[in-house]
Image (tube, rainbow, N blue to C red):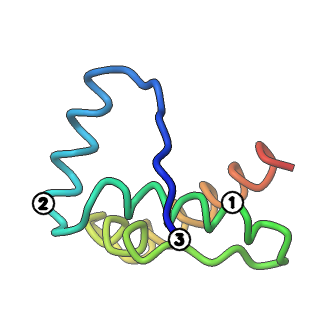
């Protein structure tokens, strides 16, 4: 079952998020759902990345830089949402 959720966000952020979702061929709802799922999964030692986050992370120029960035960002999120 799905339920409608209303979020209040900055207009510019919404426009950018919609553009990104459209470019990746997924809905904005799917991106938000994947993000919420990753938050719920944070209790696990290794938080899985959403498929969309994994795909978007691939745009970074170097895989070493990408891995370092993702590791640092993951640590940031885990500390922020403890």
Which numbered disc, 1 or 3, marks the residue that appears first in the sequence? 3
Which mark, by number, is residue 39? Answer: 1
**Foreground residue, 50 or 76?**
50
Q: Residues within 10 Å of mark 1 (few under 14, many from 20)?
A: some
Q: Which residue is mark 3?
A: 1
Q: Give SS at disc 3.
A: loop
Q: Residues within 10 Å of mark 3 (few under 14, many from 20)?
A: few
Q: CA distance from mark 1 to mark 2?
A: 24 Å
Which mark, by number, is residue 6? Answer: none
Q: Give SS at disc 1.
A: helix
**Foreground residue, 81 or 59?**
81
Q: In front: mark 3 or mark 2? A: 3
Which numbered disc, 3 or 2, marks the residue that appears first in the sequence? 3
Please tell me which residue is depicted at 26% across the width and 23% down the height of the picture.
12
* Residue 75 vertical placement versus 37 (above, below): above
Q: Which residue is mark 2?
A: 23
Instruction: Write down the quadrant of residue 48 in the picture.
Output: bottom right
Relative to 30, 34 lies left or right: right
**Foreground residue, 52 or 75?**
52
Mark count: 3
Please tell me which residue is depicted at 23% across the width and 37% down the height of the picture.
16
| Label 3 close to label 2 by CB (< 8 Å) | no
Instruction: Write down the quadrant of residue 41 in the picture.
Output: bottom right
Relative to 81, 57 lies left or right: left
Q: CA distance from mark 3 to mark 2?
A: 27 Å
Please tell me which residue is depicted at 53% across the width and 71% down the height of the picture.
1
* Residue 56 vertical placement versus 14 (above, below): below
Q: CA distance from mark 1 to mark 3?
A: 20 Å
């Amino acid at each position: 079952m799905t339920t409608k959720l209303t979020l209040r966000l900055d207009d510019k952020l919404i426009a950018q998020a919609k553009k990104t979702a459209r470019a990746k061929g997924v809905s904005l709802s799917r991106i938000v759902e994947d993000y919420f799922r990753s938050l719920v999964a944070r209790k696990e030692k290794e938080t899985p990345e959403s498929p969309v986050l994994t795909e978007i992370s691939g745009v970074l120029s170097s895989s070493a830089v990408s891995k370092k960035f993702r590791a640092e960002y993951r640590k940031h999120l885990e500390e922020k949402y403890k």
